[in-house]
Amino acid sequence: MDDTKKNLAQSVGGSTEAAEQAAPRGRRVSQWEGPNEEFLQMLMNLGISKNAAVKGLFMTDNTSVDAAASWVLDNQHLEDLDEPFKPGKDAPALEAHPFAHTFPLDEKTMKSPYKMVFVVNTELNMGPGKIAAQVGHAAVGLYKELASKPHKYDYMLSQWDDFGGTKIVLKGENSAHLFDLEDLAQKAEMPYYLVHDAGKTQVASGSLTVIGLFGSSSEVGTLTGTLSLL
């Protein structure tokens, strides 16, 4: 593995304990017609070898640069990562979940090993100020939850803070959708925080407004990668 990619892996890579302990998942069957050439070039521009980039695109079905880069960075341990790859029965077992929408892939985002993602209940039709307040509640609540368990989350929090404290706000469908994300977060042992509004303005008391999630960029992406930016 060359020095450029080692540095990239050290700055971007990182999985929560749940991700590291998860059993390998088989790649879903799909028609592979080769890598998306535009995505391939962007990955190579980030310092990822061509062979590793092709594998990342294969394992994530050419869905996005972000998904492929996350797969590569989460699989740095593979001894044959940089060797030529031909799809077939011997394809790697691990796969990042497909992304239906892509996020802006700037240098700051690529270098952030951890991030907070906030999914807003858009069914409530809250105004911009109300949404900002609810996301703020989620951010504070989630941070307090992480800070209350320094033995478990101190390193991840420091890494998150060192790289600018990446925060992304996404559109959720409704309360049921947010509860589904809560269930997935629990199964993945991912830190999360739910906000139920007091009902003083705009929405009924007890309304579920936002769920906040925290984890490695790739792990959180497996739960929220199909959602659109708010």
Image: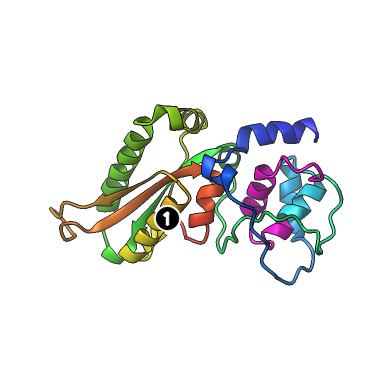
The foreground one among 17 and 61 is 17
The residue positioned farthest toward the bottom in the image shown: 31
User: Relative to residue 148, is residue 116 drawn left or right?
Assistant: right
Which quadrant, please, contains the N terminus? Answer: top right
User: Relative to residue 227, is residue 136 drawn left or right?
Assistant: left
In this view of the protein, can residue 166 be seen by the observer?
yes
Q: Residue at 72%, 48% (x, y): give it.
A: 43
Which quadrant, please, contains the C terminus? Answer: bottom left
Q: Residue at 20%, 52% (x, y): give it.
A: 197
- The question of residue 76 being in magenta is answered with yes
Where, by quadrant of the figure, is residue 110 drawn?
top right
Query: How far across and how far down the image is residue 88, in percent?
Result: 81, 64
Q: Mark 1 — residue? A: 170
Q: Tell me if residue 161 comes above or below residue 200 in the rendering.
A: above
Q: Residue at 34%, 31% (x, y): give it.
A: 148
Q: How many marks?
A: 1
Give the magenta-colored segment's residue range.
Answer: 57-81
In this view of the protein, can residue 16 be seen by the observer?
no
The foreground one among 27 and 67 is 27
- The question of residue 45 being in magenta is answered with no
Q: Amino acid at mark 1?
A: Leu
The foreground one among 135 and 230 is 135
Q: Residue at 74%, 44% (x, y): give it.
A: 45
Query: How far across and how far down the image is residue 56, in percent?
Result: 71, 53
The residue positioned farthest toward the right in the image shown: 84
* Dot 1 alpha-carbon crowd within 10 angstroms: few under 14, some 14 to 19, many 20 or more: some
Query: How far across and how far down the image is residue 193, in percent?
Result: 33, 46
User: Relative to residue 5, is residue 229 drawn left or right?
Assistant: left
